[in-house]
Image (spheres, grey):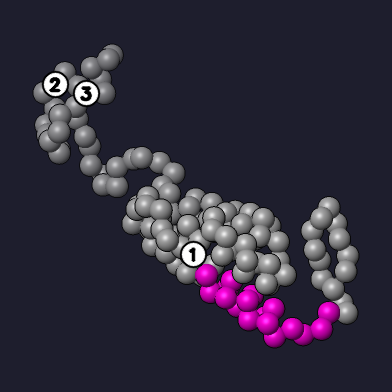
Amino acid sequence: MANFQGLKTINLEETKDPYRNLWRNVLIVGIEDLFKKKEIQYKFKNKKYCVEEMWLHHEDFDLVCEYSQLSPKIVKDKIIKALKVMEKKYVKKNNLSEMQGKWFYKTNELNRRSDGSYTPMSAV
């Protein structure tokens, strides 16, 4: 197996291990559940800390990664990176009004007629 800076890479002489594959599938299902829950939270602007997210910091996560023959730190880093990308997708980049074509004056009322003191030409 080739190693680069402590990271594992593909072993060409690796045999099939059904137990390792089982634990990798457990890990995959847990990560998919986390992504589904966080996508819903980002979509509806819910900032709560979900149960699936707590699993990342639990000793069971490290144990499942160990059984899967994966490094827990690398897996966590990749999950967090993917969550940040997902969060950027759902966060609005500007705080402008969603109502297009409406002119807002200094009052709370919509489309109020100008009282003459606030016009584009008043500064001239």
Q: Are marks 2 and 3 in contact (CB under 8 Å)?
A: yes
Name the element at disc 1: helix
> Magenta residues: mostly which secondary structure?
helix
- 91 w.r.t. 58: above or below: above
Q: Which residue is mark 1?
A: 35
Callout 2 amino acid: Gly
The magenta stretch is: 14-30
Alpha-carbon neighbours of circle 2 within 10 Å: few (<14), some, or many (≥20)?
Answer: few
Mark carried by residue 119: 3
Left/right placement of residue 44 relative to residue 83 reads left
**Mark 1 vs mark 2: in front:** 1
Alpha-carbon neighbours of circle 1 within 10 Å: few (<14), some, or many (≥20)?
Answer: some
Name the element at disc 2: loop
Of the two numbered discs 1 and 2 on the same chain, state the one appearing first in sequence: 1
Residue 69's x, y, as percent?
A: 72, 70
| Residue 2 part of the magenta-drawn span | no
- 72 w.r.t. 12: above or below: above
Dividing the picture into quadrants, the one containing residue 110 is top left
- 111 w.r.t. 27: above or below: above
Q: Residue visible at 45% across and 67% down?
A: 36
* Nearest to the observer: residue 44 or residue 107: 44
* Nearest to the observer: residue 91 or residue 31: 31
- 76 w.r.t. 26: above or below: above
Name the element at disc 3: loop
